[in-house]
Each structure stands twice: as structure tokens, then as C-alpha cells.
């Protein structure tokens, strides 16, 4: 009786896993299929949509890479991400350090306060910010995104880093300072090397969060050549009213998978950042 | 310190040194935190105040001159039936999708607690909706819900449920997912659930794995069955973390405009409009910044409530 029940449990487990994996991944499978299908195959309602009824083709990929601005979108996204990472590092690292090392009560409160600003939704901020970037002469410029994206990366990354810095005992730095290091020197030479994994985590998140961003980019940028992947693919790969599904799906796929791989790898730390307050 | 013939007292020297250090450290601490604070105040705090001011003014993109007009915008906004629809929709979307996410994430987390072959792949696939950029994932759904080439319709058709005169789902060859109000609502909710489920699952998973295993084993030995263990041990213990997951989910779902914007643009005939998309269409595309700001401020109460709940929760766990 026992082994049968166990086997049934096993079967049930795999069924559940497969159902959930199917639900999560099917849209991406759908992208892969559309990327390599010929238009004729794609647009025949009688054909089985899940399979290749005609030999696969690279036409859509070729069109996407050579006849659209897609490579430019990737490049724009990359530059914005890089600049946002730099700004986030320069502001969040000292802030988190300061809050964990000189904090007696107010530091923790202020940390929570900073974290809560992460909850202020872009849907409220984008109208004033659109005027703001306009007044600075940054409309239709990637600089507007570089300026604004840190508003969501700084609160989150500061909070995340506070967790990492807290786990490094103060004694190590104090010892270094007694040995003649300045406070700043101790921070750079002792604390930073010990927090490499924390720093790497915020680099990854600052980058992926700016790559995911949609509302600000949609509001601030309407010139095709300046778009990021997130808005370029959904708004530009449409000719007139006709969606070019092949290249569209290829673009969505190419931009999604690499970032998803990196993100998955760092996901646990991201969640740790979310929940430090709750577990403790 | 003092070298005029006297033996410097090591105690005094040390005290002075510490004093100077503490003094300069206080400044250093302030200097280090100021860039982040400045950023938050200038680009979150000030815009938040500006949003309130705009909502009380007559500012538009065409005429950025600024006159206070009182509550006129709010009156106009509230009387608009699209706005009323948007408020209703925002609540419906948030409540239904969060309920589904909570139930499903609990199940999925329990599944992922087990060991099985190919777990890393399953995990990667399950996490995809959250890890891939949402606008691009939604584009995939847009093609899946296409009015002619939807694979879901194809499956129904080949099962004989659709497209024949006496078929269960109607004689039309397609369901027109994004063209019929109830189906469009269903689609938006479905994509929200799809999107939030991975995040909620990992958070719940974090909570589940922090439950001491021997506690569960002891309960099992004492004769507590699966359901009893679930309801009397597991759920109470993961409750704080579930609350965090729920609160985040509420804020993200309540204020998100990407799914609706990409999938339906609020259509058909405004039936899937939500507060954030309506803000965008009025404020940015329509150019009426003042009304847009007024609409967006209706998001604020829910956000503030969530923030307060989180603070109370954080304080309670600190005390415990």
C-alpha cells in the first residue's frame, strides 16, 4: 500500500510542477515558436499553432536585427542601466553604511522611512516628473531616465545593503581604526571587500529594475531612436495598425531571457531584501 | 598631544582623541547619507507635493501657466463615468488577482519545498513571469490572446467546444479575448496573477523554510495530520511573511499600468480602464496635467494604508 501511495504522491507532485511551469513559461514558448515560424505558417488559422508546419525560418530575426532599431534599443537600455548602477552605488552604499554604523534608533527608523519611499508608485510621480525633466531640458533624452530611475533603485538598494552591513561585526573595523586606519579607509579596505556579494546584488538589481521599467520611459521618451527595450518593442514594432508578430516576439524573447537568467540566480537575495523586516 | 615637558596622560589623550573622532564621525555620517536623502527628497518628496499642487490648478501641457482653481479638478474627475469605472476596476483587479495569487503561491511554495529532479529548470520556468521585463511578457500574452490566432481558441475549436453552430462556447470561430468586456477583464486579471505568482511564491517559500522542521515532525508523531499541521502550525508561522507578500502585491497590482496599457489600453470601450492608465491617458496623452494629477492622487490612500500596516508589522516583529 505504502509504495503505491508514495508513487501517487510523486506523480501528483510532478503534475503540479509541470502545470505551474507550463503556466509560467508558455508565453515564452509562444515567443520562440513565433520567432522561427514563417509568416505563412503563422497566419494560417487552420495550422496547428503549437508546432512548425513549415520549416523554421530566420527571416524574423534578420528583420529585427537589421531592419529595425532593436539593436539601438538594447544599447540604450544598456547605457541607462549602467549609469543607474553607478549612481545607485555612489549614493546607496554610503547611505546604508552611515545608517548601520551611526544608527541608534533613528538609523533604523530612517532606514524604514527610505524603504517606504519605494512604495510611492510611479503612477503618482510621473506627471510632476515629466514637467520636471522638461524644465531641465531633458525631454526625449536618455538622461531623463538616468536621472529618475535611481528614485526606485536607491530606496531598495539602501535597504538591501543595510542588511549586509549589519552582518559585518563592528569590531573588525574598529580594530583597523585602532591600527591607524581612518574611518573612511576602514570602510573601503575592510567593509567593502567583505560585502562583495551584497554589492554585486545591488548592481544586478539596479540594472534589472531599470531594464524592467515601463511607465517613466513611456512618458518621457517618444523618439524612436531613444527608446529602451521595454517600450521600444511594444510600441515600435508595429507598422501602422499591423503587428509584426514574428519580429515582435523575437525582440521580446531576446531581451527577456538573459535578464531572466541573471535575475533568477540572484532571486533569493532579492527576497531576503524584501523580508528582512519580517523574519529577523 | 601636549609635549611641553610633561608626561602626556594616556587616559586624557585617548578621551580627546575619541571625542574628536566622534565629532568628525557625526559629520561624516551626515555627509554619507546626504546624497541619497537629497535624491529622495528632490525626486520623490517634491514631486509628491507638486502632484497635490497640480491637482488644485489648471495646468496643461499646452499652457503651463499655473492658477489655483481649488477642487474643480476633483469634482470633474469624480463625475466622469470612466473614472468611476476605473476605480471599480482597480479594486476588482487587485482583490481577485491577489486572492488567487495567495492561494496559488501557497500551493506552489509547498510543491517547491520538495526535492525532485530538474528542480532548477522548473524554478527558472516558474520564475520567468517575474524575472523577464513585464512589458515584454505581456506582449507574449497579447499574441496569445489574439482575436484570430489565439492558441487557446484553437484548442477549444479542435475539442469541438467552439466554432460549430451548437458548440458550448458559441458558434463564432473565436472568443475575442480582448474584444469582449468580461473576457478582457479576465485576461488582465490572468496576466496579473501570472506576473505576481512567482514573487509571492518565493516570499512564502522563504517563510516556509524558516519553520523548524523538528516542530513539524514532533506534531506528526503526536498524531497531527496534514491539514491540522498546515492550519495550526504552518499558516500561523508564515502569517507575518504572507502579510508582507500581500501588502507588496497590493501596491504593485493597484498601481501598475503596464499590463492594462499593453494588453487593452483600457478597452474595449473603457471597460478595463484602471486608475493608473486613466491617469496616463488624461494627464499625458490628453495633456491635462491637472486632471491627471487629481486622478493619480486617488492611488494615495491605499498606498498610505499599506505603508502604515507595514510599519506596524515591522514594529511588532521587533518587539517579539
Image: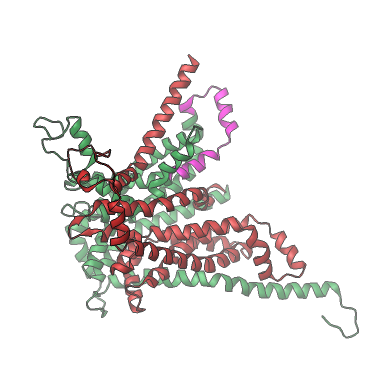
Chain colours: A red, B green
The residue sitting at 27% across, 79% down in the picture is B66
Residue B96 in magenta stretch: no
B203 to the left or right of B4: left
Farthest residue toward the left? B165
B52 to the left or right of B203: left
* Residue B289 in picture, x, y percent from top left: 26, 70
B283 relative to B175, above or below: below
Q: Please count the marks in the image.
A: 0
The residue sitting at 82% across, 74% down in the picture is B12
Quadrant of the rendered structure where residue A8 is? top left
A183 relative to A66, above or below: below
Quadrant of the rendered structure where residue A248 is? bottom left
Residue B226 in magenta stretch: yes
Q: Which residues are the magenta region?
A: B200-228
Quadrant of the rendered structure where residue B174 is? top left
* Residue A103 in picture, x, y percent from top left: 61, 63
B223 relative to B38, above or below: above
User: Magenta region, mostly helix, strand or loop?
Assistant: helix
Q: Nearer the viewer, residue A241 or B278?
A: A241
Q: Judge whether residue B101 can be spotted in this image.
A: yes
A66 relative to B16, above or below: above
The residue sitting at 52% across, 72% down in the picture is B35
Q: Nearer the viewer, residue A57 or B193?
A: A57
* Residue B27 in picture, x, y percent from top left: 62, 75
A280 to the left or right of B260: right
Farthest residue toward the top? A1
Q: Judge whether residue B251 can be spotted in this image.
A: no
The residue sitting at 65% across, 66% down in the picture is A187
Amino acid at each position: 500500500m505504502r509504495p503505491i501511495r508514495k508513487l501517487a504522491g510523486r506523480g501528483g507532485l510532478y503534475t503540479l510542477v509541470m502545470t505551474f511551469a507550463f503556466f509560467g513559461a508558455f508565453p515564452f514558448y509562444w515567443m520562440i515558436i513565433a520567432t522561427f515560424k514563417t509568416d505563412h505558417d503563422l497566419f494560417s488559422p487552420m495550422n496547428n499553432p503549437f508546432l512548425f508546419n513549415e520549416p523554421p525560418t530566420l527571416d524574423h530575426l534578420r528583420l529585427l536585427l537589421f531592419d529595425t532599431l532593436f539593436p539601438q534599443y538594447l544599447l540604450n537600455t544598456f547605457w541607462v542601466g549602467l549609469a543607474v548602477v553607478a549612481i545607485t552605488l555612489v549614493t546607496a552604499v554610503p547611505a546604508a553604511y552611515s545608517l548601520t554604523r551611526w544608527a541608534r534608533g533613528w538609523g533604523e527608523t530612517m532606514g524604514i522611512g527610505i524603504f517606504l519611499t519605494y512604495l510611492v508608485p510611479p503612477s503618482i510621480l510621473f506627471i510632476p516628473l515629466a514637467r520636471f525633466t522638461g524644465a531641465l531640458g531633458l525631454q526625449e533624452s536618455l538622461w531623463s531616465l538616468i536621472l529618475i530611475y535611481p528614485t526606485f533603485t536607491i530606496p531598495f538598494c539602501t535597504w538591501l545593503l543595510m542588511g549586509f552591513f549589519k552582518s559585518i561585526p563592528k569590531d573588525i573595523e574598529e580594530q583597523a581604526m585602532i591600527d591607524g586606519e581612518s574611518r573612511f579607509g576602514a570602510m573601503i579596505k575592510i567593509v567593502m571587500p567583505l560585502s562583495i556579494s551584497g554589492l554585486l546584488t545591488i548592481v544586478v538589481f539596479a540594472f534589472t529594475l531599470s531594464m524592467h521599467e515601463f511607465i517613466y520611459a513611456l512618458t518621457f521618451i517618444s523618439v524612436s531612436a531613444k527608446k529602451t527595450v521595454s517600450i521600444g518593442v511594444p510600441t515600435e514594432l508595429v507598422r501602422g495598425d499591423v503587428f509584426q508578430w514574428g519580429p515582435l516576439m523575437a525582440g521580446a524573447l531576446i531581451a527577456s531571457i538573459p535578464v531572466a537568467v541573471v535575475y533568477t540566480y540572484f532571486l533569493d537575495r532579492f527576497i531576503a531584501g524584501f523580508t528582512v523586516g519580517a523574519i529577523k | 598631544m601636549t609635549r611641553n615637558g610633561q608626561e602626556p596622560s594616556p587616559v586624557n589623550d585617548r578621551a580627546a582623541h575619541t571625542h574628536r573622532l566622534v565629532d568628525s564621525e557625526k559629520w561624516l555620517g551626515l555627509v554619507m547619507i546626504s546624497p541619497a536623502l537629497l535624491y529622495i527628497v528632490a525626486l520623490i518628496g517634491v514631486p509628491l507635493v507638486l502632484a497635490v499642487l497640480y491637482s488644485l490648478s489648471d495646468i496643461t501641457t499646452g499652457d503651463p501657466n499655473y492658477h489655483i482653481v481649488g477642487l474643480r479638478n476633483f469634482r470633474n474627475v469624480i463625475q466622469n463615468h470612466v473614472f468611476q469605472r476605473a476605480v471599480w476596476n482597480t479594486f476588482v483587479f487587485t482583490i481577485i488577482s491577489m486572492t488567487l495569487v495567495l492561494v496559488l503561491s501557497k500551493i506552489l511554495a509547498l510543491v517547491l519545498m520538495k526535492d525532485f529532479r530538474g528542480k532548477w529548470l522548473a524554478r527558472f520556468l516558474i520564475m520567468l513571469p517575474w524575472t523577464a521585463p513585464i512589458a515584454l511578457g505581456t506582449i507574449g500574452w497579447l499574441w496569445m490572446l489574439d482575436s484570430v490566432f489565439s492558441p487557446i481558441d484553437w484548442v477549444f475549436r479542435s475539442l469541438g467546444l467552439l466554432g460549430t453552430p451548437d458548440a458550448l462556447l458559441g458558434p463564432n470561430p473565436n472568443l475575442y479575448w480582448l474584444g469582449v468586456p468580461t473576457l478582457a477583464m479576465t485576461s488582465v486579471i490572468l496576466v496579473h496573477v501570472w506576473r505576481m505568482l512567482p514573487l509571492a511564491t518565493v516570499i512564502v517559500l522563504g517563510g516556509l523554510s524558516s519553520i523548524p522542521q523538528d516542530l513539524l515532525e514532533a506534531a506528526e508523531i503526536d498524531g497531527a495530520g496534514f491539514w491540522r499541521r498546515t492550519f495550526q502550525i504552518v499558516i500561523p508561522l508564515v502569517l507575518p511573511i504572507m502579510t508582507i507578500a500581500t501588502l507588496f502585491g497590493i501596491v504593485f497590482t493597484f498601481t501598475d499600468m503596464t499590463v492594462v496599457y499593453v494588453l487593452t489600453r483600457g478597452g474595449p470601450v473603457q471597460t478595463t480602464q484602471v486608475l493608473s492608465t486613466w491617469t496616463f491617458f488624461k494627464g499625458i496623452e490628453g495633456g491635462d496635467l491637472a486632471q491627471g494629477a487629481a486622478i493619480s492622487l486617488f492611488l494615495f490612500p491605499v498606498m498610505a494604508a499599506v505603508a502604515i500596516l507595514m510599519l506596524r508589522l515591522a514594529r511588532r516583529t521587533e518587539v517579539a
